[in-house]
């Protein structure tokens, strides 16, 4: 069933206006091992019920925002633009860290 | 002759569940039933129960577009699906039930140089593993499908196609019913309206399931063959899968004169078209990009798929739509299935079937039955273990499995 999403910038639009960014997964904070990194890349809860997810207003303001949607009914319960975190505090990606250290590259 | 008009049941439904089974199969679709059938036939295992939360064949087995083919892009994938098509070729005889397999041939249309390049690659991979697939030019496509509009003057001009003669369509319900009858005759128990609500473990070893919230059933091996609902079952067993669940939709027109005897697929136009034995045009499309467990269709799908179908078959302009439906797809990151053992001992999965599960039912049944009976993963399905995602050794079928690429 199609549904509507409330873009925090533009207001309510059809789902076809947006691109789906997938469920929100917690990013590994320190440098992960191969197994942990691949678990983060591929494995998902795929909840039947309310889940927090990313959406991108592709045909509108092109803002990335978060939504809470019930995947059993497609009812969108909440949308908001996440707070912008301090760029210097953002976690360093494992690949960038490995490059900076001049060490082994991750596959 | 009298039997034609006599009501007879294909399989019987036992009144109640026993406490113990050797094998518990969750999901009464083509994969679960095929596994039960080959367990009884090849390995003599009879203590099997099949638990289906709805009626038999209610999920993806009853909602697919019935296309069979094996023209995949990786040698692992091509070999696997080829074994499945070969089993399908003899399945009517094996099950003593007419599955109406029409091996009419399968055409994947190419609209760009890049698409034609990928088709040549697929044809080469197929040739090397002994599958009949070749690239044909636009004139040949027109000759094979006179009713289709093949022209340069189109939004998606047809430059050629990947022709796969063994591909075709089959009666999907008959496959489910045939396997159900075979499994039943072999001694397996089929329980509809039996939803698994919990999975029990002793340490890392699976011990059984709870059915409908109140009945405990013990099993030495538990197989989850639940397609779109796989993540729910794996969560009960205590682990995550690399699966997201999406809807895939299709519709049929009213019955029309027979004008199409090939399966037509266009990746770029996101459409696949065949004409059923009844004359209905069966048109399917791409999955919706967002995840959902709600099996309702979208207007967006009907608009896009009818538009593209009309570009290829303008004569369908006044055809009326008879019905449309949606089913759940369990999509894996590399568009290849996830089969066999998991981190929970004795708990097996058949998942990651995206848009291509139905065509694999017989080979999944044969290989999983062998795995259950012997405890060893057959060579054919070794590349498809869930472990590959942890080590990043994917079997990418993005170029051949999905409609969009």
Image: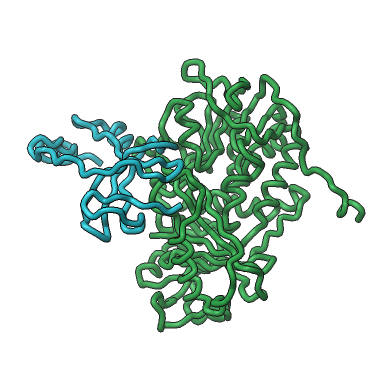
Colour that chain A carries in the picture: cyan
Colour that chain B carries in the picture: green
Residue at figure coordinates x 18%, y 37% from the top left: A94
Task: Determine the image quadrant of residue B394.
Answer: top left
Q: Residue at the front extreme?
A: A11
Q: How is the image coloured?
A: by chain
Residue A11 appears at what percent x and percent y? 26, 53
Q: Is residue B306 left or right of residue B111?
A: right
Residue B103 appears at what percent x and percent y? 64, 63
Q: Is residue A8 left or right of residue B15?
A: left
Residue at figure coordinates x 42%, y 54% from the top left: A2
Q: How many marks?
A: 0
Quadrant in which the C terminus of chain B appears: bottom left
Q: Is residue B383 visible?
A: no
Residue B41, compared with residue B294, is above or below; it is above
Q: Residue at the right extreme?
A: B2
Q: Is residue B276 visible?
A: yes
Residue B225, compared with residue B327, is above or below; it is above
Residue B268 appears at what percent x and percent y? 41, 66
Of residues B171 and B389, which is closer to you in this image? B171
Task: Determine the image quadrant of residue B252.
Answer: bottom right
Residue B219, compared with residue A50, is above or below; it is above
Task: Determine the image quadrant of residue B169.
Answer: bottom right
Quadrant in which the N terminus of chain B appears: bottom right
Residue at figure coordinates x 63%, y 71% from the top left: B261
Residue A39 appears at what percent x and percent y? 33, 35
Of residues B264 and A69, which is closer to you in this image? A69
Residue B317, compared with residue B87, is above or below; it is below
Q: Is residue A1 left or right of residue B325?
A: left
Q: Residue at the top extreme?
A: B202
Of residues B267 and B313, which is closer to you in this image? B313
């Amino acid at each position: 069933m199609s549904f509507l999403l409330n873009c925090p910038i533009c207001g309510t639009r059809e789902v076809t206006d947006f691109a789906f960014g997938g469920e929100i997964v917690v990013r590994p904070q320190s440098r992960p091992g191969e197994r942990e990194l691949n678990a983060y890349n591929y494995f998902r809860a795929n909840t039947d019920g309310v889940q927090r997810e990313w959406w991108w207003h592709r045909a509108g303001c092109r803002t990335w925002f978060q939504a809470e949607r019930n995947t059993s009914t497609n009812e969108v319960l909440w949308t908001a633009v996440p707070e912008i975190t301090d760029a210097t505090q953002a976690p360093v990606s494992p690949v960038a860290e490995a490059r900076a250290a001049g060490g082994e590259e991750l596959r | 002759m009298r039997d034609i008009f006599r009501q007879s049941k294909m399989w019987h439904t036992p009144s109640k569940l026993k406490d113990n089974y050797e094998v518990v199969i969750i999901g009464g679709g083509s994969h679960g039933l095929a596994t039960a059938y080959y367990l009884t036939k090849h390995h003599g295992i009879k203590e099997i129960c099949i638990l289906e939360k709805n009626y038999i064949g209610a999920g993806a087995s009853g909602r697919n577009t019935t296309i069979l083919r094996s023209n995949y892009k990786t040698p692992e994938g091509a070999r696997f699906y080829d074994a499945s098509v070969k089993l399908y070729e003899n399945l009517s005889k094996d099950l003593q039930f007419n599955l109406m397999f029409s091996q009419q041939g399968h055409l994947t249309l190419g609209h760009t140089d890049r698409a034609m390049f990928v088709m040549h690659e697929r044809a080469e991979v197929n040739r090397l593993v002994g599958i009949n697939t070749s690239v044909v030019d636009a004139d040949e496509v027109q000759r094979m499908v006179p009713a289709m509009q093949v022209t340069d003057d189109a939004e998606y001009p047809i430059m050629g196609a990947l022709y796969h003669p063994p591909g075709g369509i089959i009666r999907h319900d008959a496959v489910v019913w045939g396997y159900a009858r075979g499994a039943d005759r072999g001694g397996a128990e089929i329980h509809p309206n039996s939803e698994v609500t919990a999975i029990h473990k002793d340490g890392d070893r699976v011990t059984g399931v709870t059915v409908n919230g109140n009945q405990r059933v013990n099993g030495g091996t538990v197989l989850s063959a639940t397609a779109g609902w796989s993540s729910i079952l794996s969560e009960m067993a205590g682990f995550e899968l690399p699966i997201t669940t999406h809807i895939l939709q299709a519709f049929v027109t009213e019955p029309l004169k027979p004008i199409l005897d090939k399966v037509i697929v266009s990746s770029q136009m996101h459409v696949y078209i065949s004409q059923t034995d009844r004359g209905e045009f069966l048109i399917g499309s791409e999955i919706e990009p967002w995840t959902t467990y709600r099996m309702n269709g979208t207007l967006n799908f009907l608009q896009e798929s009818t538009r593209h179908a009309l570009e290829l078959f303008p004569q369908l302009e006044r055809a009326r739509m008879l019905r449309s439906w949606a089913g759940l797809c369990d999509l894996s990151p590399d568009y290849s299935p996830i089969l066999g053992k998991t981190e929970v001992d004795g708990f097996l999965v058949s998942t990651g079937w995206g848009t291509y599960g139905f065509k694999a039912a017989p080979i999944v049944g044969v290989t999983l039955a062998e795995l259950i009976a012997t405890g060893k993963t057959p060579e054919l399905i070794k590349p498809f273990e869930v472990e590959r995602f942890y080590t990043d050794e994917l079997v990418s079928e993005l170029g051949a499995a999905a409609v969009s690429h």
